Amino acid sequence: MSDQKKYIDKNKDKFLNELIELLKIPSISADSAYKGDVLKTADAVAASLKEAGVDNLEICETPGYPIVYAEKMVDPSLPTVLVYGHYDVQPPDPVELWTSGPFEPVVKKTDIHPEGAVFARGACDDKGQMYMHVKALEVMNQTNSLPCNVKFMIEGEEEIGSENLGWFVSRNQEKLKCDVILISDTGILSNDNPSITTGLRGLSYVEVKVTGPNRDLHSGLYGGAVANPINILSQMIAKLQDENNKITIPGFYDKVEVLSTEERAEMAKAPFSLDAYKKALDLSDIHGEEGYTTMERNSIRPTLDVNGIWGGYTGEGAKTVIASEAHAKISMRLVPHQDPDEITELFTKYFKSIAPASVKVEVTPHHGGDPYVSPTDNPGYLAASKAMEETYGKKPVPVRSGGSIPIVALFERELGVKSILLGFGLDSDAIHSPNEHYGLFNFYKGIETIPLFYKNFVELKK
Ligand code: BES
Ligand code: MN
Ligand code: MN
């Protein structure tokens, strides 16, 4: 057994207990009530990096939440790995659906995680995965096996659009110079089927407001004679997709990258069971764009989803009312070559064009992000693939993911460096949902795999 593996085995409980402490701090970036906790988490991450043995550590202020930056420079002539992760988490709501407190981490066994999983908001996205990198550094340091330079950049605003990370990156290009960016903020197919994420979708996110009469009205006195904004908004949303679940916004698909039959055949080789998929979600049937498989629908095809819709009376009992306003939050996941700003513009134009004259429509854009794809023939991918093959005993398959990490495309643009998405989470880990968890198997496997990535990367760069 390698010294690294021995060190991990000896320190399993310590690693887990430290992660549990980190998970107790509610670092909800979207809610300003938690500002103190987000800042406290940045300090805790910094302290853990110091403990792991970095030799330069800074908590970099930004107009928003700080970025924890750290480095350990072994030798300037050796390659440099830049680790990115985030210490902020999504809000835990609806809290009543959690079986234990979102910030009271507990380890429980599940069918998919017989070794146990730690349940808490941020367990998988991304505190648990980010912390694997801190521990991997500790492992390499303690076993004198860090083979190259390493830099850490851990942000606190990923879940709200990483606006200030862009600000930070453009001001610190020299500081962030590196040969590869390593990120664990995605997943694998299953614990028996390792995979590496080679693509992320982009994002255009808008909020819409439909206004009818200037005040809420009695639905008997006025019903039928004035536009009901909620009815109208529902009709407008229904028009955004046709009977084949294609998006109807003119120009929406114009730039979509079309995959070749060979590429699609290659994708179809990834293990996937439609029955298991439906069963896991209690669905009697699936749904999506005509002509594409489920795996394609959630990765290489763009989508449009209403994330929230509100207006009118939603309290107890019945109130007869026509609301003055109706609102919705709508996201569009984008694929290579679609431009988020352009898509937002196309959406706005079309949405306004389908509104009847009886209402006013406002569209407000939120944060967006570019899609990303990475090749599988570069040293970073090959180093990751070999590392996983060593720890899983099976070669990982490349998989394009449906999620978004907008900053990854920005890294490529600003730093000219590709990111390797070496994630270890599972789709069933319930990120952003109640009862988020992260398998202990996955946590330890990550800590074991990451040092091998470093070793392989240095070898391949020689
Ligand atoms: N880590 C996720 C993204 C992710 C998860 C990608 C799993 C692939 C597989 C990230 O924290 C996230 O939630 N991103 C947001 C976008 C962001 C702008 C809020 C998303 O994808 O909704
Ligand atoms: Mn994340
Ligand atoms: Mn997230």
Image (cartoon, rainbow, N blue to C red):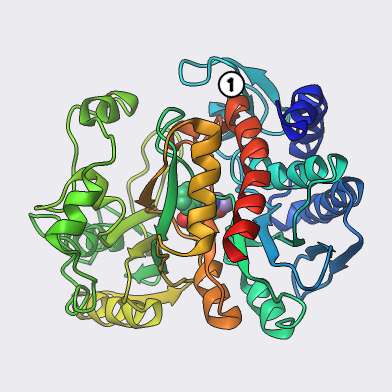
Q: Quadrant of residue 277?
A: top left
Q: Which quarter of the image is occupied by the C terminus?
A: bottom right
Q: Residue at x 63, y 45 (%)?
A: 452
Image height check: is 454 above or below 411? above
Left or right: 297 as drawn, with respect to 328: left
* Residue behind mark 1: 99
- Badge 1 crowding class, 10 Å Cα cut-off, few under 14, some 14 to 19, many 20 or more, is few
Q: Quadrant of residue 352?
A: bottom left
Q: Nearer the viewer, residue 42 or 387?
A: 387
One can see residue 450 in this view: yes
Q: Nearer the viewer, residue 241 or 59?
A: 59
Mark 1 element type: loop
Q: Nearer the viewer, residue 282 or 407?
A: 407
Image height check: is 331 above or below 102? below
Q: Residue at x 65, y 31 (%)?
A: 444
Which residue extends farthest front? Answer: 462
